[in-house]
Amino acid sequence: MTAPITPLALPTLTADPARRTAVGVRGRRLTMARLPDRRAGSTIYDVTTVDQWGRLVARACVAALSWEPGTRVAMREVGGLVVITADEDGASVVTRQGHLRLPLAVRRWCALPAGMRVLVTAAPEAGRLVVHPAAALDSMLTWLHDRVLGGEPA
C-alpha cells in the first residue's frame, strides 16, 4: 500500500499594480513582471528568406497592403532597410504568386545574399512594406537591449 500524496498549497498573491509588487502569504513583497502594453498599431510581420532570384515570399504583408499581382512598386534604401511602396512608375511588380522580387542592385545596397532570412513588415495605413536585413536587426536590438537591459546580453 502506498502513502497518500499531500496536496500542494500555492500562496495567494494580492497584486499592487501601482508598485508592481505582490504580497505573498507571509507578507513578503514579490516583484511582478511588467507586461508590455497592448499593441496600438496594425503592423503585420513576416519572416522569410531571400531566394537566389531575390524573391521574397511575404504573402500576409502584401495582402495587408492590398497589392494585387501586377501592382507596380518602387524600392529605396533608407538606413540599411529596403522600403517598398506602390508606385505607378515603379520598376518592380508584384508577381502572379504575390511575391516581391528584389533587384540585384537593391540586394547589394543592403547586403542581402541568397538564403538570408529577413523580417518583413507591412504598415497598411502608411502603404509601405519594409525589409529588415540582419545587420539592421542587430543594430536595433543592440540599441533596445542597451536601453532596456542596461547593456546585458539578451
Image (spheres, helix red, strand yellow):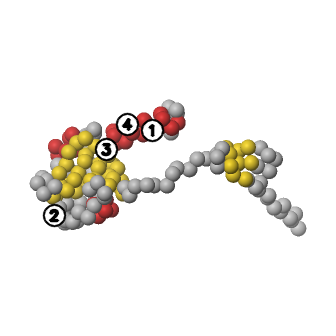
Q: Is residue 36 left or right of residue 66?
A: right
Q: Amino acid at mark 1?
A: Leu
Q: Secondary structure at mark 1?
A: helix
State the CA–CA distance, disc 4 to disc 3. 10 Å
Q: Earlier in the sequence, mark 2 or mark 1?
A: 2
The residue located at (34%, 42%) in the rendering is 134
Amino acid tagged 2: Gly
* Residue tagged 4: 139
Residue at mark 2 to residue at mark 1: CA–CA distance:
38 Å
**Residue at the disc numbered 1:** 144
Who is closer to the viewer here, 102 or 144?
144
Marks 3 and 2 sit apart, C-alpha to C-alpha, by 25 Å
The spot of residue 94 in percent (x, y) is: 19, 60
Instruction: Check contact, mark 2 vs mark 4: CB within 8 A.
Output: no
Q: Residue at x 50, y 31 (%)?
A: 151
Q: Real-space Cα distance between discs 1 and 3?
A: 17 Å
Spot occupied by residue 132 in the image (x, y as percentages of width and height): 32, 46
Decide: is 63 above or below 55.
below
